[in-house]
């Protein structure tokens, strides 16, 4: 992924542009700051659907020299993959605007920022490919008025996941006690390249049942999706109640629970 270049606006505030930062600029010494306590999306996985942009919040602390003007540089929390963080990182993602910081002392700033995630096929600014779902490292960048850059990596990790969907249909309805109920469904997940949802193949999914009047579901069995994401299994009708499928999720794909489908057993 490409992070939008960081440039200094005429007003002296740091802003994002669509231009690349030349290698010579990337080598310029940046502000003498360090980052800590970076948390993205409150520590939760970041889940992105097939088309809509997702914006999450980040919070972090910046430590600086007492004589360094906090208005002389801007800061950006980042997601990256690879051994090191920098302009040569294979995958790099940051927000559209620098963070907003408040001084808690002469040397410590408490900051927040927004990071946007756009599926590749959604618009001209889209930069997420389906192959890039998974584990990302967290880091941060500071840029000053000379376009000097200070990078800091290894501030944690997060999962960037493709949103999943799951359906359940139990039939026939109603059904006589002792007869066979067939429970079908489909597990699909967002494709960021095509802005569609496609079946997620060979994934373990739990079939659960909640008897009428009960307060919780019980797992009956675990089955795997077909090559198209389809689910199909049978159970014996024993009592009125609801069936549902539950997918625990993977590193690349969010967990999901289907809506329960009630069956009247006569």
Image (spheres, rainbow, N blue to C red):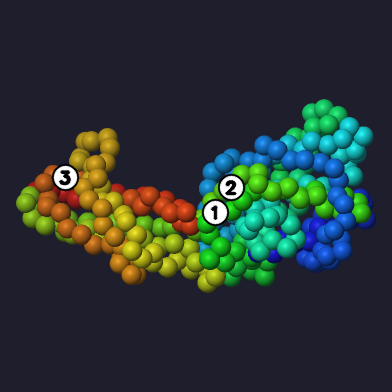
| Residue 216, x across and y down, in percent | 28, 37
Secondary structure under the numbered disc 3 in the rendered image: loop
| Residue 125, x across and y down, in percent | 68, 66
Is 86 placed left or right of 74 in the picture? left
Which quadrant of the figure has residue 234? bottom left
Q: Which mark is drawn over residue 135?
A: 1
| Residue 239, x across and y down, in percent | 13, 44
Depth check, front residue: 160 or 88: 88
Q: Which residue is tagged 3? A: 240
Q: Is the residue under label 2 in contact with that under label 1 (CB below 8 Å)?
A: yes
- Are there few (<14), some (14-19), or many (20+) residues within 10 Å of tag 1? some
The Cα atoms of the two marked residues, 3 and 2, are separated by 45 Å
The Cα atoms of the two marked residues, 1 and 3, are separated by 42 Å
Earlier sequence position, callout 1 versus callout 2: 1
- Are there few (<14), some (14-19), or many (20+) residues within 10 Å of tag 2? some
Earlier sequence position, callout 1 versus callout 3: 1
Earlier sequence position, callout 3 versus callout 2: 2
């Amino acid at each position: 992924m490409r992070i939008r270049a960081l440039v200094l606006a005429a007003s002296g505030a740091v802003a994002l542009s669509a231009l690349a930062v030349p290698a010579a600029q990337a080598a310029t010494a940046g502000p003498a700051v360090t980052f800590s306590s970076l948390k993205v999306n409150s520590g939760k996985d970041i889940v992105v659907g097939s088309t809509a942009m997702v914006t999450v919040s980040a919070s972090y602390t910046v430590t600086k020299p007492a004589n360094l003007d906090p208005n002389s540089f801007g800061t950006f929390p980042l997601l990256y993959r690879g051994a090191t963080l920098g302009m040569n990182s294979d995958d790099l993602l940051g927000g559209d605007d620098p963070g907003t910081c408040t001084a808690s002392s002469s040397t410590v700033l408490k900051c927040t920022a927004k990071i946007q995630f756009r599926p590749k096929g959604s618009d001209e600014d889209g930069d997420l490919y389906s192959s890039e779902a998974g584990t990302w490292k967290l880091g941060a960048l500071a840029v000053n008025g000379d376009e000097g850059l200070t990078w800091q990596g290894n501030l944690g990790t997060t999962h960037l996941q493709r949103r999943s969907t799951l359906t359940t249909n139990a039939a026939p309805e109603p059904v006589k006690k002792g007869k066979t109920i067939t429970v079908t469904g489909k597990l699909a997940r967002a494709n960021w390249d095509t802005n569609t949802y496609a079946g997620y193949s060979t994934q373990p999914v739990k079939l659960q049942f909640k008897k009428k009047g009960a307060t919780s579901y019980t797992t009956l069995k675990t089955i795997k999706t077909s090559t198209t994401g389809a689910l199909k299994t049978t159970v014996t009708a024993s009592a009125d109640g609801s069936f549902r499928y539950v997918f625990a999720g993977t590193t690349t794909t969010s967990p999901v629970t289907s809506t329960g489908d009630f069956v009247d057993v006569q």
